[in-house]
Image (spheres, helix red, strand yellow):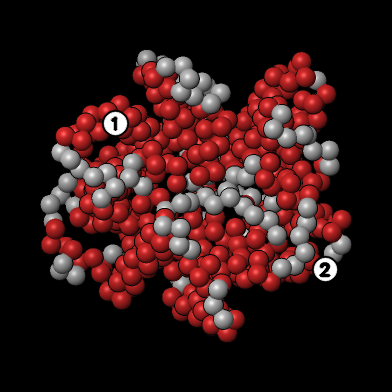
Amino acid sequence: MLFNSGKFLIFFPIVTLIYFILPKKIRQYWLLIASWYFYMCWNAGYIVLILYSTVITYISGLLIEKNKLKKKFIVAGSFILNLAVLFYFKYFNFGLGMLTKLLAYIHVSVNVPQFDVILPVGISFFTFQALSYTVDVYRGDIYAEKNFFKYALFVSFFPQLVAGPIERSKNLLKQISEPKTFDYDRTRDGILLMLWGYFLKMVLADRIAIFVDTVYGDVSVYSGYYIALATILFAFQIYCDFAGYSIIAMGTARIIGIQLMDNFESPYFATSVAEFWRRWHISLTSWFRDYLYIPLGGNKKGKIRKYANEMIVFLASGLWHGASVSFVIWGGLNGLYQVAGEILQPFKSKLVKMLHIDKESIGHKFICTFITFILVDFTWIFFRADSTGASFYTIKMMAVNNPWVLFDGSIYKCGLDQKNYWLMICGILLLLIVDFLKSRKIVIRKIVAKQHVALRWLIIDMAIIVLLILGIWGSTYDAVNFIYFQF
């Protein structure tokens, strides 16, 4: 069931209304039933996977508290059992393919069959969320949850079930245990969040996708500046798509009375790649920091070990996103950027001091932000292209020098007519303005909330009208999956 579908717009109000009517003691059971139904709308059989992960990690938490001396083995067992399922569905064919290529390299021919394995929606997200609970109990950060159904709701809470944010047990479990009463201000805030998320997805991401898909669908025809523009636009497409989902999830949870973490903090205003990754997909970045980087030793075992740990984290992040060499390259490039940035930092600081450059000046920050965007945007080619070979071919075709296509009307033949193209550009500018204000701690939603009630609801009504008129939807255009559903 997609957030941007009519089914969800019926499902969510019904779930919310019944939730607040029910006594507080049984609300968590209703939410659990609703969450399982929500997931089963994709494939009813895959509910077994959530139950499997839930049962394994629930039992692991209880055993860790009862068997302090064997808790390392229990954690290891929990990880092995959960990651084995994740590996089968997500990496089995990829592993077989890599094995075949490796054997072929040493002139050993093996006919390895390919298995038709369909990747369950959101399996990486709920698996990582469940595993984080096991580690939190092991570290003593939380007590093991005794109520199975309460814990099951933590793993499968429907707003963030299939694409995050990946919540921590210390935050979400506590809130599940303390149901809130209906609150008008919280509901209004949640609705405003949802409307902004829908704008990012339906008006921007899905519109940008038409242009990007047209160009990347045939880079031999749409070469040079077409690809450069499409790559820049893809940076905004994936941001609007993923942030749109996260914000809708935050809004739906807020109405119910649960505060989810903010997954994005104006990432394209970052002045370094390291800062970009502190602002982008925060729940996953912090997950890898807390549950992989720090256990590997973090920065406490010398610089060489630190750089190696950072590369391991980014390569793992790339592999988490998809079973493809191109995703590993994408992660590796971002890791190299961060390591290179740290190595070169003393030289950059000396250069800035020698040239008497004010680090806080607008000009300096703009240049750093621009360079960071270009570096990050280049890596998106490996994320977007269909394969590793297609990625390098795209880069090759981008070298074609045809700047005139930006000015002779050719770009209006890439799936979007002139009106929709400039509507897209205006939408991106609005996004940048909102993100810039957010980076300055100015939240538009809070400004709207302070207005007179009539003006507030006029703004909400106008926002709904804009979504209906400008959104990419209707009988001729199916509701589009969120990009991160495939991970």
Res 41 quadrant in image: bottom right
Q: Nearer the viewer, residue 296 or 421?
A: 296
Res 54 quadrant in image: top right
Tell me if residue 389 can be seen.
yes
Q: Is residue 164 left or right of residue 53?
A: left
How dense is the environment of label 1, judged by Cα within 10 Å: few (below 14), some, or many (20 and up)?
A: few
Above-or-below relation of 321 to 256: above
Q: Nearer the viewer, residue 385 or 71?
A: 71
How dense is the environment of label 2, judged by Cα within 10 Å: few (below 14), some, or many (20 and up)?
A: few
Residue that mark 1 sits on: 345
Residue at x 54% of width, y 59% of height: 247
Q: Which mark is residue 21?
A: 2
Q: Nearer the viewer, residue 220 or 104?
A: 220
Judged by depth in the image, the label closer to the viewer, 2 or 1, is 1
Above-or-below relation of 332 to 5: above
Residue at x 20% of width, y 55% of height: 225
Residue at x 30% of width, y 54% of height: 232
User: Which x, y percent locates residue 56?
Assistant: 75, 33
User: Which x, y percent locates residue 152?
Assistant: 76, 45
Above-or-below relation of 394 to 404: above
Q: Is residue 29 left or right of residue 101?
A: right
Q: Nearer the viewer, residue 403 or 198?
A: 198
Res 61 quadrant in image: top right
User: Which x, y percent locates residue 136?
Assistant: 68, 32
Q: What amino acid is at disc 2?
A: Ile
User: Which x, y percent locates residue 453?
Assistant: 59, 81
**The N terminus - image quarter:** bottom right
Q: What amino acid is at disc 1?
A: Gln
